[in-house]
């Protein structure tokens, strides 16, 4: 059978709720009106067609992302470990280089990711 697939991990509750909200929102915005939507939901292949749409969207999105990943250029190199020892020095250095245009972000970085380093690394 062509539609058989290897069983995969079931969709989690959070994702199912998110998709449900998206479908609900799409139904509310459908400009065909209540009578048309009522006929749509009564179609004997309604669920099967929804699954077919999801499969088509999955294939399209997977392919699109594969193509995009090959063409996404590096737009800025960040040097890490430049001798900056505090969050403020880091922000000021980014401002001096024109990377950001504020004197200090409202929500500072406050993360262990932004700690001083003795080695220079380019990413």
Image (spheres, rainbow, N blue to C red):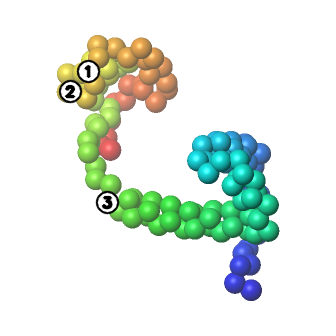
In the rendered image, the residue lying farthest to the bottom is: 1
The residue lying at 38 percent from left, 59 percent from top is: 68
- Foreground of the two, 30 or 86: 30
Q: For mark 3, what is the residue?
A: 71
Of label 2 and label 3, which has the lower sequence position? 3
Residue 78 in the image: above or below residue 95? below
The residue lying at 69 percent from left, 67 percent from top is: 49
Q: Mark 1: which secondary structure?
A: loop
Which mark is in front, 2 or 3? 3
**Residue 43 seen from this side:** yes
- Foreground of the two, 32 or 90: 32
* CB-based contact (under 8 Å), mark 3 and mark 1: no
* CB-based contact (under 8 Å), mark 1 and mark 2: yes
- Label 2, label 3: how far apart the Cα atoms are: 25 Å
- Label 3, label 1: how far apart the Cα atoms are: 28 Å
Of label 3 and label 1, which has the lower sequence position? 3
Where is residue 22? Give x, y as percent. 64, 45
Left or right, 84 with respect to 32, comes to: left
Q: For mark 1, what is the residue?
A: 101
Where is residue 108? Give x, y as percent. 43, 17
Q: For mark 2, what is the residue?
A: 98
- Label 1, label 2: how far apart the Cα atoms are: 7 Å
The residue lying at 42 percent from left, 26 percent from top is: 114
* CB-based contact (under 8 Å), mark 2 and mark 3: no
Q: Mark 3: which secondary structure?
A: helix
Q: Quadrant of residue 50?
A: bottom right
In the rendered image, the residue lying farthest to the front is: 35
Left or right, 56 with respect to 99, comes to: right
Quadrant where the image shows the N terminus: bottom right
């Amino acid at each position: 059978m062509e539609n058989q697939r290897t069983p995969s991990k079931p969709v989690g509750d959070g994702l199912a709720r998110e998709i449900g909200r998206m479908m609900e929102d799409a139904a509310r915005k459908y400009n065909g009106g209540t009578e048309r939507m009522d006929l749509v939901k009564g179609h004997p292949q309604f669920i099967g067609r929804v699954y077919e749409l999801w499969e088509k969207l999955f294939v399209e999105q997977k392919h699109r992302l594969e193509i995009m990943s090959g063409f996404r250029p590096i737009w800025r190199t960040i040097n890490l470990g430049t001798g900056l020892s505090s969050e403020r020095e880091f922000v000021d250095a980014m401002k001096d280089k024109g990377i950001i245009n504020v004197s200090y972000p409202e929500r500072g970085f406050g993360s262990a990711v932004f700690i001083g380093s003795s080695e220079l690394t380019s990413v």
